[in-house]
Image (cartoon, coloured by chain):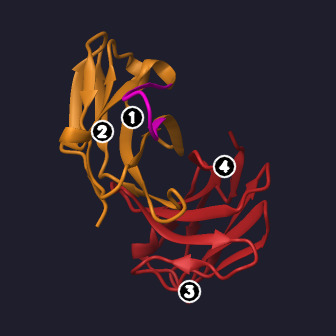
Chain colours: A orange, B red
């Protein structure tokens, strides 16, 4: 069965420091992979997605993610974190027929940013 | 992208009552989804709602508890029936726009007392 693991429940970084959020997936075929962010009291916003092609994908707000098939990973990175990046981050894999028809989410990683 | 509007954005409900959440999209979409996010938890898919057919429910969710309507390509409703405090959650509507991406609404924050 498809699954997504985000090993880190909470991460705290200093403003200006680099960030890497880990995501591992379990999926039999070529995965459709996503990162979403949920700011406090808000819905989900898509940061980036990977379907195929270049394994390093660029997203909004300066985020990028790298797909590594050999490690079944899709880690999210940002070179310099801003205080406004404090939020909950969800990795998800698309599952089902027709490419994908639903998302399976990881448990999420809550990011805190120290000034 | 898509603009997805949900109503109500927040509500406090008495146990035993039912609440209907509306989801309006600014473009026609085939696939609409309803997710639940319990406090401090991740998102779980409740059901997929395609226009012109019955909703498809995920394991653990049943139509009697979460009836869904999908009268056209831009609108859907989710009803949470006979609510208990365990139903206190964020309910999110989402749509699949083209083959690429699933977008989410702002969510409906429901508290059952």
**Where does label 2 land, which residue?**
A110
The boundaries of the magenta stretch are A49-59
User: Is mark 1 in CB contact (under 8 Å) with mark 2?
Assistant: yes
Please give the chain letter of the residue carrying mark 1.
Answer: A
Report the Cα–Cα distance between label 4 and label 3: 25 Å
Please give the chain letter of the residue carrying mark 4.
Answer: B
The C terminus of chain A: image quadrant: top left
Point 30% across, 56% down: residue:
A27
**Where does label 3 land, which residue?**
B63
Question: With respect to residue A30, does A69 lie above or below?
Answer: above
**Where does label 4 land, which residue?**
B97
Looking at the rendered image, the disc whose residue lies closer to the viewer, 1 or 4, is 4
Total numbered labels? 4
Q: Is label 3 in a helix, a strand or a loop?
A: loop
Circle number at residue A70: none
Point 30% across, 13% down: residue:
A15
């Amino acid at each position: 069965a498809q699954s997504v693991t985000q090993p880190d429940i909470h991460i705290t970084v200093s403003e200006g420091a680099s960030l890497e959020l880990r995501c591992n997936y379990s999926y039999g075929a070529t995965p459709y992979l996503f990162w979403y962010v949920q700011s406090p009291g808000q819905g989900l916003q898509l940061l980036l997605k990977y379907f195929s092609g270049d394994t390093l994908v660029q997203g909004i707000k300066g985020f990028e993610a790298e797909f590594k098939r050999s490690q079944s990973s899709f880690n999210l990175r940002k070179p310099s974190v801003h205080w406004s990046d404090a939020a909950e981050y969800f990795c998800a894999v698309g599952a089902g027929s027709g490419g994908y028809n639903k998302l399976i989410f990881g448990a999420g990683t809550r990011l805190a940013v120290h000034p | 992208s898509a603009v997805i509007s949900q109503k109500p954005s927040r509500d406090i409900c008495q146990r035993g009552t039912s609440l209907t959440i509306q989801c309006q999209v600014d473009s026609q979409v085939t696939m609409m989804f309803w997710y639940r996010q319990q406090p401090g938890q991740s998102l779980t898919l409740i059901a997929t709602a395609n226009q012109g057919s019955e909703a498809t429910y995920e394991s653990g969710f049943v139509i009697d508890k979460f009836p869904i309507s999908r009268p056209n390509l831009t609108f859907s409703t989710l009803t949470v029936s006979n609510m208990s405090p365990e139903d206190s959650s964020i309910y999110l509507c989402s749509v699949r726009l083209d083959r690429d991406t699933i977008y989410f609404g702002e969510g409906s924050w429901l508290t059952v007392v």
